[in-house]
Amino acid sequence: MTVRAALTPLVAGTTWRRGVFLLLGGVLALPYGVLAVTFAQLFADSAIPRPLVYALLVIAALIAGAPLLLDGSRALEIAAVRALLGVDLPEPVPGHRVDRETRLRSALWIATHLVVGALVMIALFSALPMALAFIAQQFGIGTELISRERFGPLDGRDGGWLTVSGVVLLVGLGYAVAGLGALAGSMAPVLLGPAPAERIAALEREALQLAERNRLARELHDSIGHALTVATLQAGAAREVLHTDPEFVRRALTAIEETGRTAMDELDHVLGLLRETGNERPVVAPQRTLADLDRLVTDARAAGLAVHAHRGGDTARVPAAVSREGYRIVQEGLTNAARYGDGPVTLRLDLHPEALELELVNAMSRPGRTPLGHGGRGLDGMRERVLLLGGRITVGPDGDRWLIRARLPYEETQ
């Protein structure tokens, strides 16, 4: 081991941060020290009735021990460990009740932190000034104080040995702080780590967050992708007849404007959900449902896509969740048909008392230009929507056609 490697723990930033963590425990232990001194004086005073002192001791012990068992104390210790010890402990799960075993482990950690921190603080307040005085006397500073004292086998006349002792004491303090900090870092996951129930709760929370992110990603993909496809097709058709059919160009520009505004509303809704923090309320835009299906089909036709729609049943009786997902599936199917298909699209929508069945069929005349050849994000989104509702879906080539067939079960609303 080189000298540089040996001195690294004394100058490393982690050692200083760990020292601050230990001193923090000493600061928190000060009220307990004052309380101990106070009761020592009470017991030493024979004029105070012993039953009263014991009663006060029990009350003080209950008050002093309560912070060790509080969830907030554990959360503060975890935050301090993450910031000062550099241990990546998971944050406590909000609203999750801590079990007794975890609470006892946390109380043991906090008590140990207070005791070790108090010892480190005492060592620094006593040994550190002494070590500095030993070193300073070598340069003629404070020699009159050192010369009148005796320090074990050494006295004021042993200036060289006192200086060596001071240096050794300083180095020893540094290594002690580094060692205790490293030990605290290794023990923190054991005493402050999550219980199995907390791990499960954290995994469930992450799964919910991931599902929400996936849902928002699907919303963005379907709504914005559809809007861009319709606007692109409208713009292309308008460009072809720019000088020969001004009325068609006007209608196309109007449709592009309306499609853009609708897309902006939906984008505001999704971004509002992403921005939601604290008491801030997200921007809420109307969610598209099967009630908006006629408008969707009209926009697709205006973009130049021939759509033959057949619908049976009352969409108002379909639950909102199923109605929203069904609309998005149809929207994605029409978008893919406009981008990759050829010829008319046949849309069939059948509403039964127990399920919604929908089917989209269009011709494929451009090999290699199917949605699957374009990454399949929209198709994956369809499958996820159907899976979340407990339904089933068939997507893929069917001869020279592209077929989407889905069944979404539900309980009919009254």
Image (tube, rainbow, N blue to C red):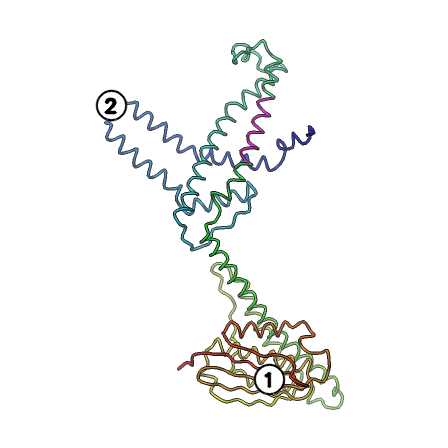
Image position, residue 320 (x, y; %) = 47, 77
Q: Nearer the viewer, residue 145 or 247?
A: 145
- Give residue 223's position: percent from left, percent from top: 59, 75
Residue in the image at 62% along x and 15% along y: 138
Q: Give the residue pinned by disc 2.
A: 47
Q: Name which residue type carries label 2.
A: Ala
Indicate left or right for 328 with 37 as reference.
Answer: right
Mark 1 sits on what residue?
360
Instruction: Depth check: give the residue in front, 41 or 66.
Output: 66
| Position in image of residue 339 (x %, y %) | 68, 80
Q: Which residues are magenta?
A: 168-181
User: What main secondary structure does the magenta stretch of the protein show?
Assistant: helix
Q: Secondary structure at mark 2?
A: loop
Task: Give the structural element (helix, strand or loop) at label 1.
Answer: strand
**Residue at 40% from the left image edge and 53% from the top image edge:** 97
Answer left or right for 229 relative to 134. right
Asked if the stretch drawn in magenta spans residue 169, the answer is yes
- The quarter of the picture where the N terminus appears is top right
